[in-house]
Image (cartoon, rainbow, N blue to C red):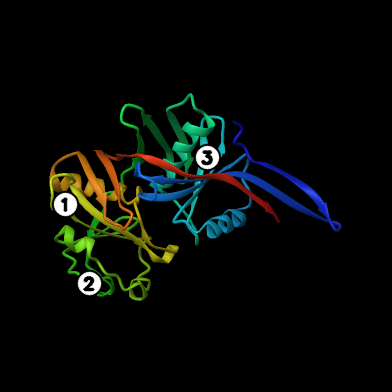
Amino acid sequence: MDSRPQSWKTETDGAVKKNLIMKYFVVDAFTDELFKGNPAGVCLLDKWADDSLLQSIAFENNLAETAFVVKNDSGYDLRWFTPETEIDLCGHATLASAFIITNFVDKNTHFTSFSTKSGILTVNFVKENELYEMDFPARKPVKTEINQIVQKAVNVQITEAYKSRDLLLLVDTEEQVKNLEINFDILKTYKDCFAFIITAPSSGSEYDFVSRFFAPNAGIMEDPVTGSSHSTLIPFWAERLNKNKLTAKQLSKRGGILYCENNEDRVKISGKAKLYLEGNIKIQY
């Protein structure tokens, strides 16, 4: 199957118009159940289009992230766009991209290397348990003051706050994370981070910790399951729980499970994936 897009130019009323056809997929990541986990768009291109067009496609798709993938000499270039902006790291759309490559582009490989804004990211498909294991940079957070704007925006008491790319907010119980209510009008006035992670220890033995993730200033009110946030959550909870292998659950409505490993300056994040949609995007511009 040839999954490469095609592009060409046509003359229309004396003006040159560009036409673009690209393969497009939607994959539910961090789940093996349809309509669970986190849906990501994956677009396969033969070469990069203008950034403004990529952003418009992501806006039109209206998923938390749309991934754009271009083959290079050693693997693939990978970029991620929310409906509002390009971002530097996205876990679920990386997992989704690896799922598409191993199932639709190169069925003979179980290992995918991506060149990204966060460096080289690799994904290894472990066939025995159907897990896609991603190797990401760790983003260990640094303790900071609890901001009163942020505290006012949530309906639970924040016990500690930590900063990396995102602002990690620790609360006491899993139930508080599950029943969280956010005043987004207030939360959006705080600009000193990309997003907000709210986390607590798990109340049971099946998972080590739970979390939820909000990025209202990037057009994402709540992300269902967030790989990139676990680049911060894994080193945080590994140190706190004194263990390097952890299982995490994200408590969004869709929910998702992540299998995690702390490796000093790197983390491994593993999950499953399920195909929802396969088709073509056809654009004349």
Q: In percent of the image, x 17 and y 69: which residue is there? A: 157
Secondary element at tag 2: loop
Count of labels in the image: 3
Residue 25 screen position, x and y as percent = 52, 45
Q: In percent of the image, x 41 and y 35: which residue is there? A: 122
Report the side of 135 relative to 27 (left or right).
left
Which of 141/129 is in front? 129
Q: Is residue 96 above or below residue 51?
A: above
Report the side of 44 relative to 93 (left or right).
right
Q: Marks 1 and 3, how far apart in space?
A: 36 Å
User: Tag 2 or tag 3, which sits nearer the N-term?
Assistant: 3
Residue 176 screen position, x and y as percent = 18, 63
Report the side of 278 relative to 262 (left or right).
right
Mark 1 lies on residue: 202
Residue 22 screen position, x and y as percent = 62, 44
User: Tag 3 or tag 1, which sits nearer the N-term?
Assistant: 3
Give the quarter of the image for residue 13.
bottom right
Secondary element at tag 3: strand
- Quarter occupied by the C terminus: bottom right
Mark 2 lies on residue: 155
Give the quarter of the image for residue 245.
top left
- Quarter occupied by the N terminus: top right
Q: Amino acid at mark 3?
A: Asp
Mark 3 lies on residue: 77
User: Tag 1 or tag 2, which sits nearer the N-term?
Assistant: 2
Q: Marks 2 and 1, how far apart in space?
A: 19 Å
Q: Amino acid at mark 1?
A: Ser
